[in-house]
């Protein structure tokens, strides 16, 4: 692989992210879901409530963005807010039965793409890619 200068490396990441977003948006459009909504549904455990602040941290979102996403998912009947039994002022986010179904559909789409990638890349390359992406993420977060 040729050496990429930092601007070209960033461009490569940006272009790949755009293609990935387009790939998922096309497949999610029939479910009236966007990539951010789908990512949020994947982060919510089907087994129990999730704290909105911890969800925002996992997805690297501001509180206001998280609130908007949760509002839209609640309006669609995919999540519900319930009081946090351990914090009178807090709430927890739960998937509804429809939310669990949507989450399973999204998970299946993600697994399909993972299989497509695994068909063309050896496991060692995938492991290296994950390590590199992690390092890049940490470096730009400094």
Image (cartoon, rainbow, N blue to C red):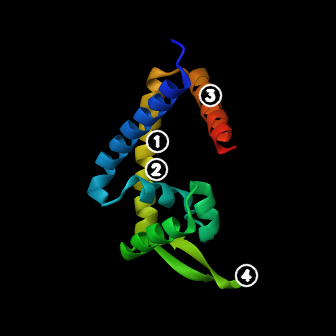
Question: Which mark is drawn over residue 127?
Answer: 3
Looking at the image, the residue that sits furthest to the left is 30
Q: Residue at x 43, y 47 (%)?
A: 108
Say if mark 2 contacts mark 1, CB within 8 Å: yes
Name the quadrant containing residue 87: bottom right
State the separation of the CA atoms marked 4 and 3.
Answer: 39 Å
Q: Toward the viewer: 86 or 107?
A: 86
> What residue did someone put label 4 on?
86
State the separation of the CA atoms marked 2 and 4.
Answer: 30 Å
* First reached walking from the N terminus: tag 4 or tag 3: 4
> What residue did someone put label 2 on?
107
Kindly tell me whether residue 48 is visible in this rendering: no
Residue 32 position within the rendered picture, expressed as x and y whole percent measured from the top left: 30, 61
Residue 53 position within the rendered picture, expressed as x and y whole percent measured from the top left: 63, 68
* First reached walking from the N terminus: tag 2 or tag 4: 4
Query: Relative to 121, is 57 above or below?
Result: below
| Disc 3 packing (10 Å; few <14; some 14–19; many ≥20) | few
């Amino acid at each position: 692989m040729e050496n990429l200068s930092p601007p070209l490396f960033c461009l490569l990441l940006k272009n790949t992210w755009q293609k990935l977003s387009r790939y998922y948006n096309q497949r999610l459009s029939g479910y009236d879901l966007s990539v951010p909504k789908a990512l949020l549904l994947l982060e919510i455990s089907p087994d129990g409530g999730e704290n909105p602040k911890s969800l925002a941290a996992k997805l690297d979102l501001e509180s206001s963005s998280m609130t908007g996403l949760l509002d839209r998912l609640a309006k669609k009947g995919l999540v519900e807010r319930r009081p946090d039994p351990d914090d009178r002022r807090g709430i927890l986010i739960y998937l509804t039965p429809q939310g669990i179904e949507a989450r399973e559909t999204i998970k299946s789409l993600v697994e399909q793409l993972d299989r497509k990638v695994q068909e063309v890349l050896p496991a060692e390359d995938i492991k290296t890619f994950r390590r590199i992406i992690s390092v890049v993420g940490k470096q730009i977060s400094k």
